Amino acid sequence: MLRSRYKTFVFAAFMLFFASCASIRYTEKFTFFQMADTQFGFFNENKEFSRETRNFEKAIAETNRLKPAFVIVCGDLVNKPGDIAQINEYKRIAATLDPAIKIYNVSGNHDVENIPTASAIRTYQEHFGPDHYTFRNGNIFGIVLNSSLIKDPSKAPNEAAAQEAWVRTALEDGKNSGSRNIVIFMHHPFFLNSADEPNEYFNIDIDRRKMYLALFDKYKVRKIFAGHYHRNAGGRTGNIEMITTGPVGRPLGSDSSGFRIVDVNGTAITHKYYRLDSLPATLKLR
């Protein structure tokens, strides 16, 4: 009888300890960096990419100095789809990142074509890995999408349908994962400022926009991070915040080249965009 009670006590104590550790893990404070549009070749119409090299080297050097939990680059890694020199330069610089800091790549329209094809997607996958996937880091369950397939699926309908079916499974996985934050990462923003804004080059067409936003709201997604606009923008629809981040590479507006620093504290996710020449001395959530 005493031995049985002792076993019960030890088991209960173990489960309490495990639950406590899980709670600590899921409410961990940490910081990650969101970059976008390194886009090697854009400054000089694919003739060369020295300015993109300087900017991305600076971004990676600052990442190594500040040591976030991870960095994610939200698409348009290169300017000319499939260009081996541009791809190799991106990968060369990315490889200088501290191995303790995970880097996640996201496909953009300049990586898989404005109207993506199955062939272009395969080329991207050969060089950079999956074009849609999930990851866990800290208390975030990240869902990475190929937004070019959402923007215009006409030349790759099978791939677009497969991704749409997959994202529903991914959202279920996120709900059941124990993570407190399901976060979407993609290249095209669903909208720049307002969920009912008209269709344009820089957003997702309204029919598909409404469908995905309703789906994300159902699964309590609260943050969507994107690039593509080469400027900063953002807005809200219901409980969802759409965050569009300016480029590491060539800007198209008043926002200088830079990236976004994102602080995670439990379910609170806050963020600020920094120019490459004005990054903080330290991270506040260390």
Image (cartoon, rainbow, N blue to C red):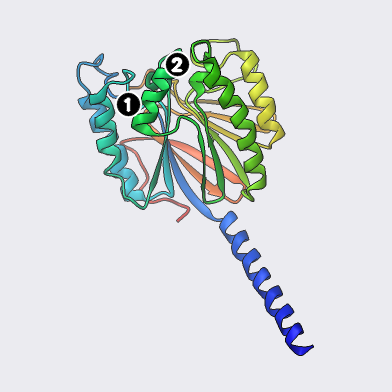
Q: Which mark is residue 121?
A: none
Residue 261, image x and y in percent? 44, 41
Q: Residues within 10 Å of mark 1 (few under 14, many from 20)?
A: many
Which residue occupies 32% across, 35% down?
276
Horizontal arrangement in the rendering, residue 40 relative to residue 253 (left or right): left
Q: Nearer the viewer, residue 85 or 160?
A: 160
Residue 154, image x and y in percent? 52, 10
Mark 1 to mark 2 CA distance (whole Å): 22 Å
- Label 1 SS: loop
Q: Residues within 10 Å of mark 2 (few under 14, many from 20)?
A: many
Residue that lies at the very extreme toward the bottom in this rendered image:
2
Q: Which residue is mark 1?
A: 249
The answer to whether any part of residue 191 appears in the image is no
Give the number of marks: 2
Q: Amino acid at mark 1?
A: Gly
Q: Which residue is mark 2?
A: 116
Q: Amino acid at mark 2?
A: Pro
Horizontal arrangement in the rendering, residue 90 relative to residue 17 (left or right): left
Figure check: 240 above or below 41: below
Q: Quadrant of residue 217?
A: top right
Quadrant of the snapshot with the N terminus: bottom right
Please tell me which of labels 1 and 2 falls first in the chain. Answer: 2
Figure check: 25 above or below 128: below
Which residue occupies 25% across, 30% down?
88
Q: Nearer the viewer, mark 1 or mark 2?
A: 2
Q: Nearer the viewer, residue 8 or 245?
A: 8
Residue 160, image x and y in percent? 55, 20
Horizontal arrangement in the rendering, residue 14 relative to residue 156 (left or right): right
